[in-house]
Image: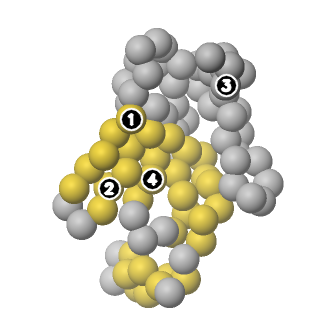
């Protein structure tokens, strides 16, 4: 599969890349996914076909650590998985 990016067809690439604003995005995917650069805004935002889905937490999050190796991972030291 491929996606038209700026008039050029690119192969899909799920690797995570750090953006200039500190957020993390997928390189080339069928739906654009952006992970927050930290703070109280949405933790993750997905855009597809003119629609947007955002997920937030009831807390402020620190900036994510640099994207990890495959499989694509991004972690935050202050978000716990325990309940």
Front-most of 43 and 3?
43
Q: Earlier in the sequence, mark 2 or mark 4?
A: 4
**Badge count:** 4
The answer to whether 56 is drawn above or below residue 21 in the figure is above
**Front label number (2 vs 3):** 3
Q: Dots 1 and 2: beta carbons under 8 Å?
A: no
> Residue extending furthest right?
69
- Residues at badges 3 and 1 in contact (C-beta under 8 Å)? no
Along the polypeptide, which appears first: circle 4 or circle 3?
4
Residue at 50% over, 87% down: 1
Q: Nearer the viewer, mark 3 or mark 1?
A: 3
Q: Which residue is mark 2?
A: 47
The residue labelled by disc 3 is 81
Between 5 and 29, the residue placed more toward the observer is 29
Question: Which of the 4 image quarters holds residue 78?
Answer: top right
Could you tell me which secondary element the residue under label 1 belongs to? strand
Separation (CA) of disc 1 from disc 2: 12 Å
Observer-side mark, 4 or 3, equals 3
Query: For residue 55, which quarter of the picture?
Result: top left
Which secondary structure lies at badge 3?
loop
Read off the residue under disc 4.
33
Disc 2/disc 4 C-alpha distance (Å): 7 Å
Residue on which the image places disc 1: 55
64 relative to 46 in the view: left or right? right
Element assignment for label 2: strand
Task: State which mark lies toward you, 1 or 4.
Answer: 1
Q: Earlier in the sequence, mark 1 or mark 4?
A: 4
């Amino acid at each position: 599969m491929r996606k038209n990016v700026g008039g050029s067809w690119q192969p899909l690439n799920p690797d995570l890349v750090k953006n200039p604003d500190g957020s993390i995005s997928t390189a080339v995917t069928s739906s654009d996914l952006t992970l927050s650069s930290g703070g109280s805004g949405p933790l993750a935002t997905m855009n597809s076909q003119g629609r947007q889905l955002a997920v937030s937490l009831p807390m402020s999050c620190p900036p994510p650590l640099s994207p990890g190796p495959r499989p694509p991972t991004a972690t935050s030291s202050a978000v716990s998985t325990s309940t």
